[in-house]
Image (cartoon, helix red, strand yellow):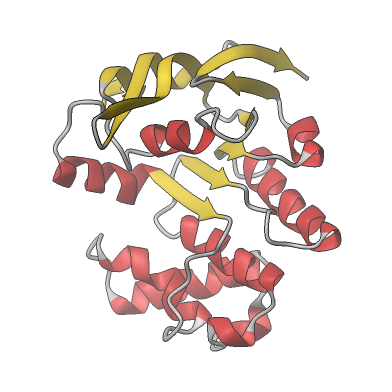
Amino acid sequence: MKKEKIIVLNEVWKIYKMDEVDFPALQGMNLDVKKGEFLAVVGPSGSGKSTALNAIGALDVPTKGVIYLDEKDISKLSESELAQIRGKKIGFVFQSFHLIPSLSALENVALPMTFQRISITERMKRAEELLILVGLKDKLNNLPSQLSGGQSQRVAIARALANNPEVILADEPTGNLDSKTGVEILNLLKNLNKKEGKTLIVVTHDEKIAKEADRIAYLQDGKVVNVKKK
């Protein structure tokens, strides 16, 4: 059975104004992602990888073009509508973790559920389950300053799963980690894709990650120039 497309980018442009100059970060980008797929997005610095991820994740709206998420055009929604979509359908994992320093691992993971009006009891229960899932059963009450880089990234992944999103977007998730820890994080993301059925899109410079993906999309000058299947 053919998998349906969960994300479609059609002639997407993103033009930033810098002083009096227009800078096109995306230039007519076309891409589709199937449900349950693991897609790696690669390309040189300045090729538009992070801009594309922000557009897919409803963090930014395109200047021109259309983006469909689950057959809904998200390119023309208001900020409050985009926030709802981000909260329910998309989980983000960043290179720099972005954990809140004053909150414990448990509280960091529970935080996204606050905005979905989930009770505190349920939030804490699910946060604990997710931290156990990512192998941090003994770090629930640790602050980010008490965690290693790999442990912080595991917390960030657990937080990305808080609202059970269909899509996980990861921007250089192993970029700040040593190679051994990077492999552990890669295996964790692969398990979420293969065992949990999450659609996984990873922007990466790491060849190990790219090789594990179902497809690799190569970006250059703000557009997809090649897509390679495994």
Return the x and y of residue 126 as percentages of the image width and height: 46, 69
Q: Quadrant of residue 156?
A: bottom right
All told, the count of numbered labels is 0
Residue 178 vs residue 143, the one in the foreground: 178
Return the x and y of residue 13 as percentages of the image width and height: 35, 19
- What's the residue at 72%, 56% (across, down)? 185
Q: Quadrant of residue 57?
A: top left
Q: Is residue 55 above or below residue 216?
A: below
Q: Quadrant of the N terminus?
A: top right
Return the x and y of residue 46 as percentages of the image width and height: 54, 33
Return the x and y of residue 150 as percentages of the image width and height: 70, 68
- What's the residue at 45%, 40% (across, down)? 166
- What's the residue at 57%, 69% (across, down)? 155
Task: Farthest residue to the front: give it.
Answer: 20
Residue 212 vs residue 217, the one in the foreground: 217
Q: Is residue 91 above or below residue 110?
A: above
**In the rendered view, does 82 fall on the left or right side of 24?**
left
**In the rendered view, does 86 fall on the left or right side of 196?**
left
Q: Quadrant of the C terminus?
A: top right
Q: Is residue 135 above or below residue 166?
A: below
* Viewer can see residue 135: no
* Viewer can see residue 87: yes
- What's the residue at 48%, 63% (across, down)? 159
**In the rendered view, does 60 fall on the left or right side of 94?**
left
Q: Is residue 177 above or below residue 54?
A: below
